[in-house]
Amino acid sequence: MDDILEILEGNARISLEDLAKLTGKNKKDIEKAIKDYEKKGVIVRYKTIINKGKIKNGSGVIALIEVRIAPQKDVGFDAVAERIYKFPEVKSCYLLSGTYDLLLTVEGKDINTVASFVAEKLAPLSSVRGAVTHFMLKKYKVDGVILSQKEKNERLAITY
Amino acid sequence: MIAKHIEKLAPSGIRQFFDLVLGMPEVISLGVGEPDFVTPWRIREKAITALEEGMTSYTSNKGLFVLRKAITDFFVKKYSLSYDPEEEILITVGGSEALDLALRAIIEPGDKVIVVSPHFVAYPALTEIAGGRVLSLLTSEENGFKIDLKILKNLIKEDPKAIILNNPCNPTGTTYNASELMKIWNVVATKKTIVISDEVYDELNYEGKPTPFASLSKEAKKRTILVNGFSKAFAMTGFRLGYACANKEIISAMTKIHSFAIMCAPIVSQIAGCEALRAQKEVADMRVEYKRRRALIVKELNRLGLSLKKPQGAFDCFPSLKKYKISSLDFAKRLLFEEKVAVVPGKAFGNEYDSYIRISYATDFEELKEAVVRIGRFLAKLSK
């Protein structure tokens, strides 16, 4: 992966100036490269990872839902997936191999919200053959970032 | 009470400075000689498993055969350089122990050892502990801190027992390529001098492929004690794991001392070391990160007007203070007190280098950036 993308993936808020320092490229070239990536949809969005467990009333309910679906003629899974991922409650949607087809991440303010999404919106779809809902209890690691902050081992400040 | 040759060892001014740094809170330290990365998880996980499985015994003096074999395979694959894992490799407690053993195994009282300066602090000290006499081979900034063959030819006339090379070099980051090493070997080969080649930073080489000294020729291999370790490239300083590769006779002598003094390197570290040699992706990732920081620090220090050769390896640079007319210790002390940034005075790496400081970029980006701001402020004050 390009240096610029790699650095941005770790820190989307890094300044052009710092990017220039780290990559040895000049700011104008970097700015242009980033614009290109944005245009081509390589860079989709700049996102912040928030540890909602640390905010008062910050954490709603998250569920991972395994969905078994009947693929439709000509369009396969894609059309069904589209029906499902367009619901704003669905935060992510993946097609998987294995015992079920789609894996959804669904967020709601409480269990009832998620339950009614499943019962009223997801399950009634004709191509949905079954759904298993797993409520998330705790997040340990998100997008490569470990959320718990343990005490860091400090190096000696000066050594040879 | 203390033996005279030990008593005179300590570079006292520098030691006091180190104590000052260690006693001061909230310092941004660019004085650290170890990676800021934690050991990659796959390596730590192996160590944990080893403990769970009850791997808590001694190993053979030379170290676990699987590790010696893994080192052999690693060198063959990477450099087509082959050592017999039975008789030509010794696992040590860090590269430092390997250096110590190498010197003690070959030096007799009064033997001369060429130390290329600026040098890692342990070289002259270990030479003297072993009863040897240091012949300093000074290098200069103008020459990229590389060995001047004319000086080497002169020193070789004195029939030194050994020469210690450090490639890439701490503190300067200077790295030698194959043809430069060959020129050095051609001079050394005229005598019976043994080359102790400290290659502990070999994986942290940003410009090209590293060349082990022993890979130059059959004859060079016979006369080389290759010293390496896991501390730097694999971020395993606390595991204390290193090794030496050399001919059977030398390894056997080194093993003798090692078996009496240390017995063996810790078994858990040795098991972790086997995994480390497989962690090439992790090492590559760290190398990329160091390379980025190197770009930052070189560019920024140049912008601040510090004269600086671009280091090609390791994670240090060695800028000059000549234009400020200040000793390295005074500079380091004032920078510490006035801006809370720690660097190592150049004097630590040889008395002749009192107008240099060592700056380590094994520190995260945000801290490096802040340190540069503070150094800039300090230099502005100095220039007034």
Image (tube, coloured by chain):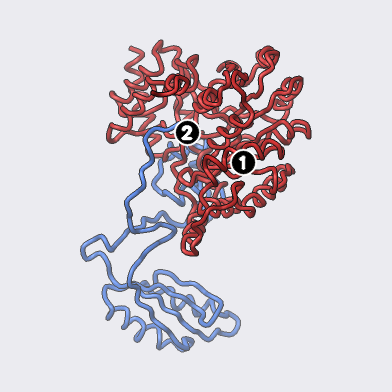
In the rendering, what colour is chain B? red
- Residue ID at (32%, 82%): A115
**Pointers 1 and 2 within a single chain:** yes
**Would you say residue B176 is visible in this rendering?**
yes
- Say which chain tag 1 marks: B
Q: Closer to the N terminus: mark 1 or mark 2?
A: 1
* Horizontal arrangement in the rendering, residue A46 relative to residue B246 (left or right): left
Mark 1 Cα within 10 Å, few/some/many (few <14, many 20+)? many
Residue to which mark 2 is pinned: B296
Residue that appears at 34% across and 18% down: B380
Element under disc 2: helix
The answer to whether residue B340 is above or below residue A155 is: above
Asked whether residue B139 appears in the rendered view, the answer is: no
Give the x, y percent position of residue B11.
42, 21
**Direction front: furthest residue:** B1
Q: Where does the C terminus of chain B fall, quadrant-wise?
A: top left
| Residue B295 sits above or below residue B41 on the image | above
Q: Which dot marks residue B255?
A: 1
Q: Quadrant of residue B101?
A: top right
Q: Amino acid at mark 1?
A: Thr
Q: Mark 1 to mark 2: distance in Å?
A: 43 Å
